[in-house]
Image: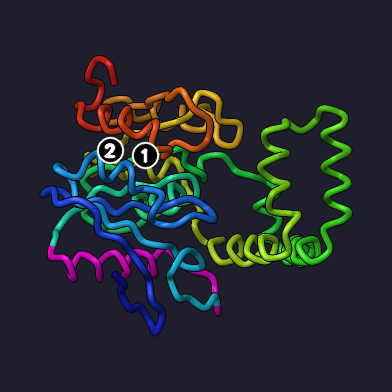
């Protein structure tokens, strides 16, 4: 399925036939199919809309200018109108977690719950900020994506001194060895630079609107560890719960999603959650 927005086309999948609706946003370099396993587990309770985000999957999108939270909000309202529902759960994995957190903090969308899976955005990454928020940093970033040799050598040197965790090194190196992956990285990082999470504002919005928050993290995740989500739970204790899974960063693996679905079926702070 697809929906038109300003002469662009967003491809999405509709999974499940439950009475409650979920807008589920995938992580960097993935597509809406990432949520297929979880949506299938919860298909009786929820209907999932799983878009391919702009510059991902089958969506047809020209990155003429950076994407803005108000653009994503408008797209979601178009989906609400198309499928005739009045409220939804917002769910996001990794980069998608940053996008839905930003929406929950800044929009007036009728949100029932917020589900975050190893969400990006709660911890400020200085390299991302320099690469996308400063002119000189963005120029250096673009040059490095075109001529990555110096950066590859620097990473290998850091790895040899044990200054860089092998998991992070392996995760990063996959984007640097392929020309298309580097091009995509530059375009996507720049395209989504306006999605910034203000944790205090998000917490206040969740409390004001009484929106429950469910956070899921992997016990062995070196990319986005559970420590990134502790502040939200500690400062919104009545409405939030954090669930630690026996996994790394890939929380939506079909082997793990039954445990996630079981936790979602429990009320916030139910024993066992």
| Tag 2 and tag 1, C-beta contact below 8 Å | yes
* Res. 253 image quadrant: top left
Residue 155: x %, y % from top left: 82, 42
Q: Number of marks in the image? A: 2
**Where is mark 2, residue-wise?**
207
Q: Report the quarter where the N terminus lies.
A: bottom left
Depicted 221 relative to depicted 111: above or below? above
Task: Look at the numbered disc 1 and give the secondary structure of its residue.
Answer: helix
Residue 156: x %, y % from top left: 85, 40
| Residue at 46% from the left image edge and 22% from the top image edge | 246
Distance of label 2 from label 1 (alpha carbons): 6 Å
Q: Is residue 66 magenta?
A: yes
Judged left or right of residue 129, residue 13 is: left
Q: Which mark is residue 159?
A: none
- The main secondary structure of the magenta stretch is helix
Residue 131: x %, y % from top left: 70, 58
Q: Residue furthest bottom?
A: 7
Q: Is residue 71 magenta?
A: yes
Judged left or right of residue 129, residue 52 is: left
Residue 132: x %, y % from top left: 65, 60
Q: Report the quarter where the C terminus lies.
A: top left
Task: Look at the numbered disc 2 and give the secondary structure of its residue.
Answer: helix
Q: Which residues are magenta?
A: 64-84
**Where is mark 1, residue-wise?**
203
* Res. 110 image quadrant: bottom left
| Residue at 79% from the left image edge and 62% from the top image edge | 140
Nearer to us in this view, 170 or 131: 170
Judged left or right of residue 1, residue 227 is: right
Depicted 101 relative to depicted 14: above or below? above
Judged left or right of residue 231, residue 104 is: left
Depicted 223 relative to depicted 259: above or below? below
| Residue at 41% from the left image edge and 39% from the top image edge | 252
């Amino acid at each position: 399925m697809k929906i038109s927005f300003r002469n662009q086309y967003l491809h999405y999948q509709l999974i499940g036939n439950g009475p409650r609706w979920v807008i589920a946003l995938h992580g960097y370099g993935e597509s809406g199919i990432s949520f297929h396993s979880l949506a299938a587990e919860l298909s009786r309770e929820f209907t999932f809309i799983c878009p391919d985000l702009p510059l991902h999957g089958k969506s047809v999108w020209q990155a003429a200018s950076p994407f803005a939270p108000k653009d994503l909000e408008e797209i979601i309202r178009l989906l609400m109108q198309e499928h005739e529902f009045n409220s939804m759960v917002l769910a996001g994995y990794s980069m998608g977690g940053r996008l839905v957190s930003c929406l929950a903090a800044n929009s007036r969308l009728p949100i029932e719950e917020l589900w975050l899976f190893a969400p990006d955005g709660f911890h400020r990454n200085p390299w991302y900020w320099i690469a996308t928020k400063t002119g000189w940093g963005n120029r250096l970033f673009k040059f490095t994506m075109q001529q990555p040799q110096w950066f590859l050598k620097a990473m290998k040197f850091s790895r040899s001194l044990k200054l860089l965790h092998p998991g992070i090194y392996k995760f990063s190196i996959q984007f640097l060895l392929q020309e298309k992956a580097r091009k995509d990285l530059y375009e996507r990082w720049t395209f989504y630079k306006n999605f910034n999470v203000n944790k205090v504002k998000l917490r206040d919005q969740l409390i004001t609107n009484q929106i429950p928050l469910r956070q899921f993290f992997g016990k062995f995740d070196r990319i986005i560890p559970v420590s990134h989500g502790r502040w939200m739970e500690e400062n919104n204790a009545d409405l939030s719960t954090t669930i630690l899974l026996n996994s790394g960063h890939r929380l939506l693996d079909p082997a793990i999603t039954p445990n996630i679905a079981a936790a979602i079926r429990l009320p916030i702070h139910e024993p066992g959650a």
